Image (spheres, rainbow, N blue to C red):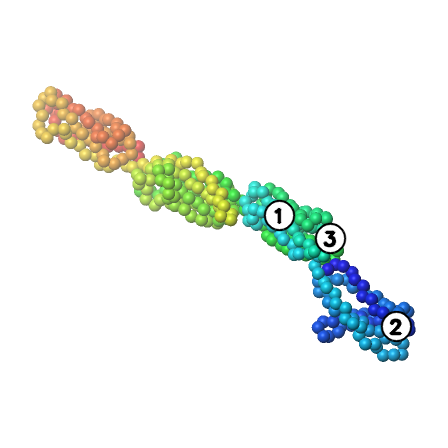
Amino acid sequence: VGDSIELHCASDEIPPLTFIFFKFNGPKAQRLKDVRSNEKFAVHQLKVAANTGKNYSCQVQASGINYSRHSKIVQITVQDPFSDPVLEIEPSDTIFEGDSLTIRCMVNFTPLFLGVQPQMMIVKDAIAITTIYNTTTAVFTTTAALNDTGEYECMAKWKEAMKMTKRKVIVKVPVSEPTLKSTRTGDNVLEGDTLDLSCAVLKGSYPITYKFYKVTTDAALYQKSLNATEAVYSITSVNSEHHGTYSCEASNTVNQRNQTKRSQYVTITVKVPVSNPTIKGNSLKDVHKTGEVVTLLCHSTTGTLPITYSLFLNKRFIYSASKSNTEPAAFKVLINETNDGGEYKCKAENEI
């Protein structure tokens, strides 16, 4: 393919002569060209292509006589000088931005054409990015960027023979480090309220998988794959068990290869209102003598610490005590006179 050949037709008749060249498609002859000659021969030049016929013959017509019989059929063997090009892409045709990208364009030559030196080209989006002569391999190497996404062609050319193959390369953007945020100001939330945790990235090719974690557990609390740069984990009714430190993870994948980034940590403080306190004495008796010290215990079973307990006698404030643990507050009361007797009550408060 790509060569030029000459078909010679000769006769013993006296010139001038008309030489007629034929190509055979099966048993049927196709008239190619008539050549008038003052010689006893004529030449027809033929450009060989992949669809060039294999069988040819000729006839001669002398002045005043009929056509001669067809000559013996000449058979032409048409052979491609090289194989179909092979386009190799490493590490694969879908990669992450920043990966090393190598595109290799190769052909193999048939034994009859081992000395042929072709032109090899790698073309992206109709623009040649690599052109090499006198070799069977062209190579293009780069650090992959987003604009390297596109259709690549491997082209091999020698004379009029040209072959090509195409493949598409997709460059994906790895996820950036995510940011975890709470919808609550100061990351404080009241028991019973709704808490939304947002995990967001600035960039990353879709889909992106988001996972939310609490540092006390290895398993993800919630995960979702989205075509979005943000995912939200919602807790509809917060309780004290949701108090703690959280983080999130964002990842995307190329050819079973993950790019995973973890966020910073965010501590969520669940504020629990104090329950109604109970008050009781450390003695089973209700009547006490003058000079006796009575201990009154005031306690709320739930509530965010610290809790401030206040003691009252007949609605009169006596004194208060703050507790930073779950133990009851112990109020010591000295019975000096009869008006130290009466109804004692306590009140419990925290910052909520």
Please state if 114 lies on the left or on the right of 203 as rendered.
right
- The type of residue carrying mark 2 is Asp
Please state if 186 lies on the left or on the right of 275 as rendered.
right
Residue lying at 68% horizontally and 54% vertically, measured from the top left:
109
Residue 322, percent across and down? 26, 27
Please state if 2 lies on the left or on the right of 152 as rendered.
right
Q: Tag 3's secondary structure?
A: loop
Q: Tag 1's secondary structure?
A: strand
- Please say if the residues under marks 2 and 1 sit with CB atoms less than 8 Å apart: no
Distance (Cα) linking label 2 and label 1: 60 Å
Using the image, tell me which numbered label, if any, was put on residue 103. 1
Distance (Cα) linking label 2 and label 3: 40 Å
Which mark lies nearer to you, 2 or 1?
Answer: 2
Q: Which residue is mark 2?
A: 12
Distance (Cα) linking label 1 and label 3: 23 Å
Q: Which residue is mark 3?
A: 116
The crowd level at tag 2 (other Cα within 10 Å; few <14, some 14-19, many 20+) is few
Which mark lies nearer to you, 2 or 3?
Answer: 2
Residue 35, percent across and down? 85, 69
Residue lying at 9% horizontally and 25% vertically, measured from the top left:
288
